[in-house]
Image: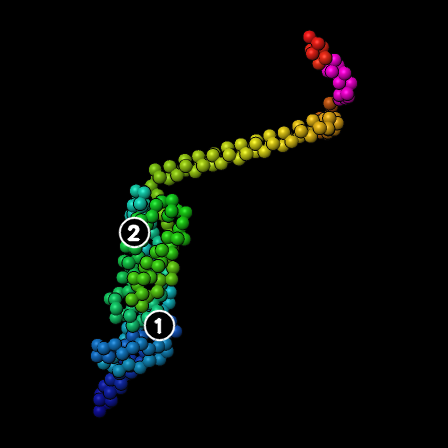
Amino acid sequence: MFTSVVIIILFVVFILASAIRILREYERAVIFRLGRLIGEKGPGLIILIPIIDKMVRVSLRTMALDVPAQDIITRDNVSLKVSAVIYFRVIDPRKAVVEVQDYMFATSQMSQTTLRSVIGQSELDELLAERDKINKQLQSIIDSHTEPWGVKVSNVEVKQIDLPVEMQSAMARQAEAERNRRAKVINAEGEFQASQRLADAAKVIGEFPTAVQLRFLQTMSEIAAKSNSTTFFPVPIDLLTPFIKQKDDDKKAK
């Protein structure tokens, strides 16, 4: 009699353990009854029919999937190793279970093939300068393929681009040449602007000879401030004007 009671208690415990499930807030249960899909349940406490019902637990949280480095040749024949990371989440648990065998593995494989395809159609300069555009293109293509599986790809980021050593050296030389070119252009632009200002100053001095005297006095003030031991003997330029004029007249007479 005691043995029978123990067996009954154990059987009841087994039935309750098989029938009762507790799901977290971010989990859903896809229920199959005798092999047929009847829907999803959760979160919280759910009750299953033992032996008849089977449950597949699916997480709705956003997951990060690392895409291993892929050997890729770009459109301009540059060999690269490119890795990426993908952020996705399940939005339809029923499709994620029924439409694909393993949505994690399938999404990973789709990401790798799409990464090779998109990078292979791009040039190196485009890949380095327009990474946001490449990321959006990858996200759009991968999401269009995973949508029938109930998986939403929210973001794709190209994580690392490994260039050959020869290409790194060539890019360094190119960057140095570009910096030298810009420096020469800026220097030439500065010389041109300075010549324009000197020409304007010459016109002003030509119209107002007194400006030469003012400039002379300003130069004396600057030199005196820097070299206190220097002695000046100012000579008015007007005193030299008659001699210069006489010399010019003598040249004309000859």
Which residue is under mark 2? 116
Where residue 172 appears, as percent x and y from the top left, is: 41, 38
The dot on residue 217 is none
Magenta span: predominant SS is helix
Callout 1: helix, strand or loop?
A: strand
Residue in the picture at 24% in, 84% down: 11
Question: Vertically, is 41 above or below 65?
Answer: below
Say which quarter of the image contains residue 109.
bottom left
Where residue 132 appears, as percent x and y from the top left, is: 41, 53
Say which quarter of the image contains residue 245.
top right
Question: Vertically, is 155 above or below 23?
Answer: above
* CA–CA distance in space, label 2 to label 1: 33 Å
Q: Is residue 87 one of those drawn in magenta?
A: no
Which quadrant of the figure contains the N terminus? bottom left
Question: Vertically, is 134 above or below 252?
Answer: below
Question: How many numbered badges does the structure rendering display?
Answer: 2
Q: Type of residue at label 2?
A: Arg
Q: Nearer the viewer, residue 168 or 209?
A: 209
Q: Type of residue at label 1?
A: Glu
- Foreground label between 2 and 1: 2
Residue in the picture at 76% in, 16% down: 242
Query: From this viewpoint, is residue 203 visible?
Result: yes
Which mark sits nearer the N-terminus, 2 or 1? 1
Query: From this viewpoint, is residue 217 visible?
Result: no
Q: Residue 237 vs residue 131: left or right?
A: right
Residue in the picture at 75% in, 21% down: 237
Where residue 78 appears, as percent x and y from the top left, is: 31, 42
The dot on residue 27 is 1
Q: Are marks 2 and 1 in contact (CB under 8 Å)?
A: no
Where residue 235 appears, as percent x and y from the top left, is: 77, 20
Question: Magenta segment, which residues?
Answer: 232-247
Q: Nearer the viewer, residue 46 or 142?
A: 142
